[in-house]
Image (cartoon, rainbow, N blue to C red):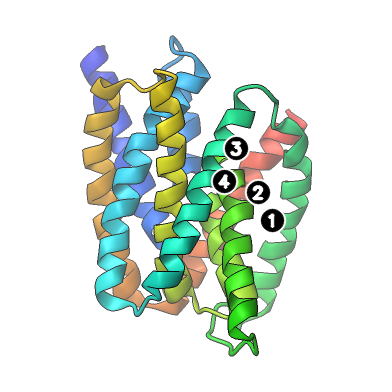
């Protein structure tokens, strides 16, 4: 029974890594299914354990993107630091406060994003934003702060929200937005990992095999996204946003 559970969790991790590498939202697959598969464990322990495969898969995807997409590493380093601190703070708050009040609001936001993305064929095609250098840095830090905190506090769909923010506020195309999102997402995952490690909430006998499978899925997903380009990522992004809406709608109306 234990072996079959680990095998199924590894398949879940592979699928999550693949999806997350393309458009974000791998947590929508990995988190709820893992909670179902591990009913004997506290939810906080499951979520803490899942941060290891999430970090591993995202790191492999980030390396793949870095080889093909031009990135501003100075800006990314600052964003990663801010996102790390914000995610750690969000995880602390999660430990003492319910996050359920945020989900109705996020559901409305996601529905609006899905409608806009579907209706606007140019969304996710590179558009020049007339930002000064200072404004660009403010947007970059603001994105990292808000979504980093969100990832530590709530979690599901954080990668997709990063993609949305990079496209909307900084004018990136889907490919560049996905590449940048991976590096910021790495920092948010690491922030949460540090918190859950200190709390002893990670089970490595589960986390390590899942991490290996998530890495394989992440590598394949990133390669496919780079090969297929913006149109493919846009379609995949829409699918993930719709799944996120369903997930949040279930949480809100159950």
Q: Earlier in the sequence, mark 1 or mark 2?
A: 1
**Residue 26 screen position, x and y as percent:** 44, 47
Q: Is residue 77 visible?
A: yes
Circle 2 sits in a helix, a strand or a loop, which is it? helix
Report how many numbered discs are placed on residues in the image: 4
Q: Earlier in the sequence, mark 4 or mark 1?
A: 4
Q: Is residue 31 above or below residue 239?
A: above
Q: Kindly identify which residue carries mark 1.
A: 110
Q: Residue at x 38, y 25 (%)?
A: 197
**Residue 152 screen position, x and y as percent:** 55, 39
Q: Earlier in the sequence, mark 2 or mark 4?
A: 4
**In 3D space, how far apart are the residues under numbered discs 1 and 3 (Cα atoms)?**
21 Å
Disc 1 + disc 2, Cβ < 8 Å:
yes
Q: Single out the mark in the foreground, 2 or 4.
A: 4
Q: Residue at x 33, y 36 (%)?
A: 52
Q: Earlier in the sequence, mark 1 or mark 3?
A: 3
Q: Is residue 221 visible?
A: no
Q: Kindly identify which residue carries mark 4.
A: 86
Q: Kindly identify which residue carries mark 2.
A: 245
Q: Kindly identify which residue carries mark 3.
A: 90
């Amino acid at each position: 029974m234990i072996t079959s559970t680990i095998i199924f969790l590894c398949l879940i991790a592979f699928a999550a890594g693949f999806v997350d590498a393309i458009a974000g939202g791998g947590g929508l697959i990995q988190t709820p299914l893992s909670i179902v598969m591990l009913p004997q464990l506290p939810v906080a322990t499951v979520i803490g354990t899942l941060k290891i495969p999430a970090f591993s898969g995202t790191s492999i995807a980030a390396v793949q993107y870095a080889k093909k997409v031009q990135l501003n590493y100075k800006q990314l380093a600052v964003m990663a630091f801010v996102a790390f601190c914000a995610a750690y703070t969000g995880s602390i708050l999660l430990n003492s406060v319910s996050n359920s009040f945020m989900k109705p609001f996020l559901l409305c936001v996601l529905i609006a994003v899905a409608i806009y993305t579907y209706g606007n064929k140019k969304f996710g095609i590179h558009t020049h934003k007339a930002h000064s250098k200072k404004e660009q840095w403010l947007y970059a830090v603001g994105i990292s702060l808000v979504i980093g905190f969100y990832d530590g506090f709530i979690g599901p769909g954080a990668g997709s929200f990063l993609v949305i923010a990079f496209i909307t506020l900084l004018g990136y195309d889907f490919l560049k937005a996905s590449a940048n999102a991976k590096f910021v997402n790495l920092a948010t995952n690491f922030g949460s990992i540090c918190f859950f490690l200190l709390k002893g909430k990670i089970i490595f006998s589960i986390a390590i095999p899942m991490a290996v499978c998530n890495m394989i899925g992440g590598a394949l997903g990133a390669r496919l996204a780079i090969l297929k380009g913006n149109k493919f990522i846009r379609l995949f992004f829409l699918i993930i946003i719709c799944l996120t809406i369903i997930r949040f709608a279930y949480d809100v109306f159950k």
